[in-house]
Amino acid sequence: GAGVSQSPSNKVTEKGKDVELRCDPISGHTALYWYRQSLGQGLEFLIYFQGNSAPDKSGLPSDRFSAERTGGSVSTLTIQRTQQEDSAVYLCASSLFQGDGYTFGSGTRLTVV
Amino acid sequence: AQSVSQHNHHVILSEAASLELGCNYSYGGTVNLFWYVQYPGQHLQLLLKYFSGDPLVKGIKGFEAEFIKSKFSFNLRKPSVQWSDTAEYFCAVKSGTNAGKSTFGDGTTLTVKP
């Protein structure tokens, strides 16, 4: 597609529920990244994919967080048993190759109540 | 671990003033350097990037940045700002050993008064 697409754009969920966030990168971009941005905070790295493999998942905050990428394209970030501290904007980005700059999506604003 | 420091949290300028936003990183090896901008209500977008070669790089909308290796710096500049430059600016670095992941600074909010 023309840009990085993320869905949903907003998600309100109850504490303890599971959520899935989706990212559709630019076609042909081999690298895909997940970050999150909390209010007043910078960008916190979560995980990145090169193709379908995740060479670096060091930023995932706990084992409640997982992500996968299939077909070298769409990625899903899953948060299980959501907590209030998970509330943030979750950003997805892709790049043509691993060292290049990012094209970001518009993000998913997650609110855990 | 590598880190990125942006010295100014909030900068306020009048239109036509010159801009320089500081960025320093802590990594001694080869780096790729980036500046991103987030305009109000919009998503982050790449402003400019440096990989190698001429240390003075030019980006969109009249912005430029200079890589000074000895100072571990990559400061963003614009000779004359406009009201439309009001935005948040993020510096980011990718290190040679982990070129996939970017480390971002905390961002600088620029407010340009008309």
Image (tube, coloured by chain):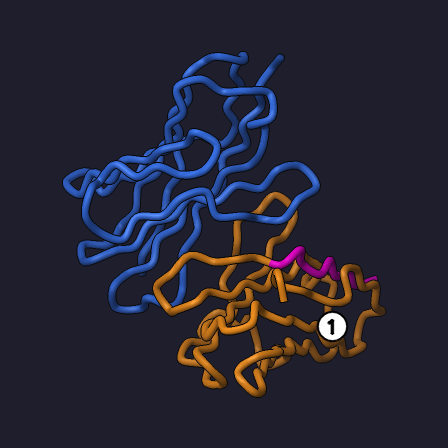
Chain colours: A orange, B blue
Q: Is residue B39 left or right of residue B32?
A: right
Instruction: Name the image quarter holding the C terminus of chain A.
Output: bottom right
Q: Residue at 40%, 80% (x, y): give it.
A: A55
In percent of width and height, residue A91 lies at 61, 60
Q: State the SS at label 1.
A: loop
Is A32 placed left or right of B70 in the picture? right
Residue at the spot 73% in from the left edge and 68% down from the top edge: A83
Of A17 and B64, nearer the camera is B64
Q: Mark 1 packing: few (<14 Cα in 10 Å), some, or many (20+)? A: many
Identify the image quadrant of the N terminus of chain A.
Answer: bottom right
Residue B19, given in percent of the width and then of the height, sits at 42, 22
Q: Residue furthest left?
A: B70
What x and y, as percent, mark residue B90? Answer: 47, 43
Residue plotted at (30% across, 39% down): B57
Q: Is A81 placed left or right of B110 in the picture?
A: right
Numbered disc total: 1
Residue under mark 1: which chain is it in? A
Disc 1 designates what residue?
A: A82
Tell me which amino acid carries mark 1. Answer: Thr
A21 sits to left or right of B112: right
| Displayed quadrant of residue B66 | top left
Boundaries of the magenta span: A105-113
Residue B104: horizontal and vertical position, in percent? 44, 51
Q: Is-magenta flag for residue A39?
A: no
Establish if A31 lies above or below B32: below
Residue B95 in which image quadrant: bottom left
Residue located at (55% from left, 67% from top): A34
Residue A99 occupies quadrant: bottom left
